[in-house]
Amino acid sequence: MLAFAGNSLLCRIALTETAIDAASFTSVRLVSGALVLALLVQLFKREASGSGNNLSALALFLYAACFSFAYLTLDSGMGALILFGAVQASMIGFGLWRGERFSLLQLLGLLLALGGLIALLWPGVSAPPLTGALLMLVAGVAWGVYSLRGRQGGDPTRVSAGNFLRTVPLAVALSLVMLADLQVDTAGLSYAVASGALASALGYAIWYTALPLLKASHAATVQLSVPVIASVGGVLLLDEALTLRLVLAAIAILGGIALVILERR
């Protein structure tokens, strides 16, 4: 969860305090992550299955790209809140599609979470920019898909490496499409490499290690800590404002989702 929050902080710092553009940040992040994971696979050769797949790679790329462009206008705390609100909604939606039945308390929690999200995105004072919020919602759904597919098992390092390697052509294509906006500097590249090699490559490999050992609801629950970590980090490191609207929306969204995913006794 610290790695996930770290990605929010690194991306926000890079896009606001350095010259790097969002497409370049995404590409460097994915390529550096792929290189580190490929190196780990070669260094620790062992008899294990897993090579990733195209659908997981597409979800990973959509998450990374929308994540970067969303942070052009969102602060780290707000971005993480929207991101993981969407993650929970997508994972809960998957559970409903699989035929899970919700109790009255869980339904009330879902309504509370949706109400908090609507209040967060409603136009007005301190509301996040709509385009950034929508991009982060897409990123959250994509990450939810990536997380759910990670529960299928396989060697986590090999699976993560395969998924990251499959995103490289997509990342290159994105950079070519956005070539007119190309801007890089040493500081921006450093943040992008740190996000890819550390917070993403190692963090996601650890996440894929944990996922097969967790129930889907437990995997969703632990991610609720990320917006809190990112918000605190943004306030302490980036001098971001902790607004009343953000606090109230966070309580509604995260509290409501927590009610939804609580296990029935």
Image (cartoon, grey):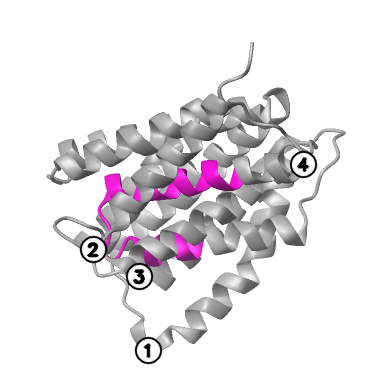
Look at 52% across and 56% down and name the residue there. 32
Looking at the picture, which amino acid does disc 1 mark? Ala
Look at 13% across and 45% down and name the residue there. 241
Looking at the picture, which amino acid does disc 2 mark? Pro
Point out the residue furthest to the front here.
104
Where residue 53 appears, as percent x and y from the top left, is: 78, 56
Q: CA distance from mark 4 to mark 2?
A: 35 Å
Look at 59% across and 48% down and name the residue there. 90
Question: Along the polypeptide, which appears first: circle 3 or circle 2?
Answer: 2
Question: Along the polypeptide, which appears first: circle 4 or circle 2?
Answer: 4
The residue indicated by pointer 1 is 180
Question: Along the polypeptide, which appears first: circle 2 or circle 1?
Answer: 2
Determine whether label 3 and label 2 are within 8 Å by CB. no
Q: Which mark is residue 98?
A: 4
The residue indicated by pointer 3 is 131
Looking at the picture, which amino acid does disc 4 mark? Arg
Query: What range of the chain is rendered magenta?
Result: 64-91
Q: CA distance from mark 2 to mark 1?
A: 31 Å
Question: Along the polypeptide, which appears first: circle 4 or circle 3?
Answer: 4
The residue indicated by pointer 2 is 123
Where residue 252 appears, as percent x and y from the top left, is: 34, 36
Look at 31% across and 69% down and name the residue there. 20
